[in-house]
Image: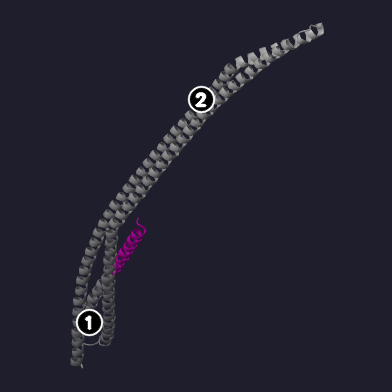
Amino acid sequence: MTVSLDRQISKFQAKVQQELTLKDDEIERLKHDIVQTNAEIAQIEDQINIEKDKYNHQEAKVVGKERKQKASIETIKTRLNTSHSERIYQITQQQSEVINEIHQEFETKLAQIEQYSDALTQQRTKGITDEIKKTKEMIDKVKQKISDQEKRGHSDTEDEIMENQEIEINRVKALENALKDKNKERYESLMSAKQQLSQCVTTLEESEKEHRINLDNLLQKLRQLDEKYKDRLKRMKDVHEREIEPLKRRKSEVEKRISAAMRQMDSMDAQHRRQIESVVTQGEQLKLEYQNAITKGAQLQQEDDKIRTQTQKLQQLTQTLEQRDKQLAEVRQQNESMKREVMRLKHEAKVAKRRAHLNI
């Protein structure tokens, strides 16, 4: 029975030693994988940081250039608007001054023409008026004389009376003809003044027409400047879009690389998790076998010293197993650290994607 028990203990010891050796190899391999994974993660993080730095630098460069272009466009626009406003104001002021001068000159000329016409009419009709007045006075005197003669009973001859009347009638006709001539001259003077007034009106209309033509030309120039400004703005916008397109493609490539790295890290994390679960399962089985061995050892405590020696060896194996459990715990802790690092990288990738989407 002792020989059989020794064989069982030897087999169990060999099995435990083999399991421990396998677990040691597995732990060493996992440690190597963890070191390699950490190196790959560090390399990926370095690549991500490099790509982020490149993207941030390029983005800052594009944003600065875009702000500079916007400021330049706003400056040009403000300068053009100010220049246009000042030019329109100057032209409006000049045209207003010209129109006011034309109106004032027209009013002055019209007043001068009216004064000259009135003075000329008065001057030309003054003699006729005086003659008419004198003739009327003379006719009144003749009538008075005839009446006095009739009253005094003078017997003037009929021929003398007719002669005097004919003389007076001729004088009246001469005065009427002179008055007609003066009226004709006055009419001609008024027609001349009317012609001058018409010329002034024509000059004013031509000035207004010229003003409208100048204003239309200015508006045409302003429209042309506005079209040039719109074309220039469109060209600048096209250039900006052409410059931003490679950055968008670069950003898409960086996002794809980050996604690939995240998938790779997820795959490695899942693989390590499966390996750790397998090691834990095997450790549990080893603990169970060890407990069974302890139970059998307790039943055989009354055996010889060899059994106690094997029990001590089993205790040593237990300590070794506990050390392996500690190592497994450390592996689990490292795995949790890797998980947190992966989650951090995912979060940074999402933040970078949002910033790129919002053009921040």
316 over 253 or under it: above or below: below
Crowdedness of circle 2 by 10 Å Cα count: few (<14), some, many (20+)? some
Q: Main secondary structure of the magenta part?
A: helix
Residue 231 on image: x %, y %: 34, 51
Element class at badge 1: helix
Report the coloring of the rendering. one colour
Classify the position of the C terminus by image quarter.
bottom left
Q: Is residue 334 visible?
A: no
65 over 125 or under it: above or below: below
In three-dimensional space, the C-alpha distance between marks 2 and 1, rounded to whole angstroms, equals 141 Å
Q: Give the residue type at disc 2.
A: Lys
Please name the residue shown 24% across and 66% down the image.
41
Element class at badge 2: helix
Please name the residue shown 30% across and 54% down the image.
240
Q: Give the residue type at disc 1.
A: Thr
Q: Which residue is mark 2?
A: 109
Please name the residue shown 65% across and 15% down the image.
171
Residue 355 on image: x %, y %: 34, 58
Residue 76 on image: x %, y %: 35, 43
Residue 133 on image: x %, y %: 67, 14
Classify the position of the N terminus by image quarter.
bottom left
Q: Report the magenta residues as a range.
A: 332-360
Q: Is residue 177 visible?
A: yes
Q: Which residue is mark 1?
A: 311
The single residue placed furthest to the bottom in the displayed view is: 1
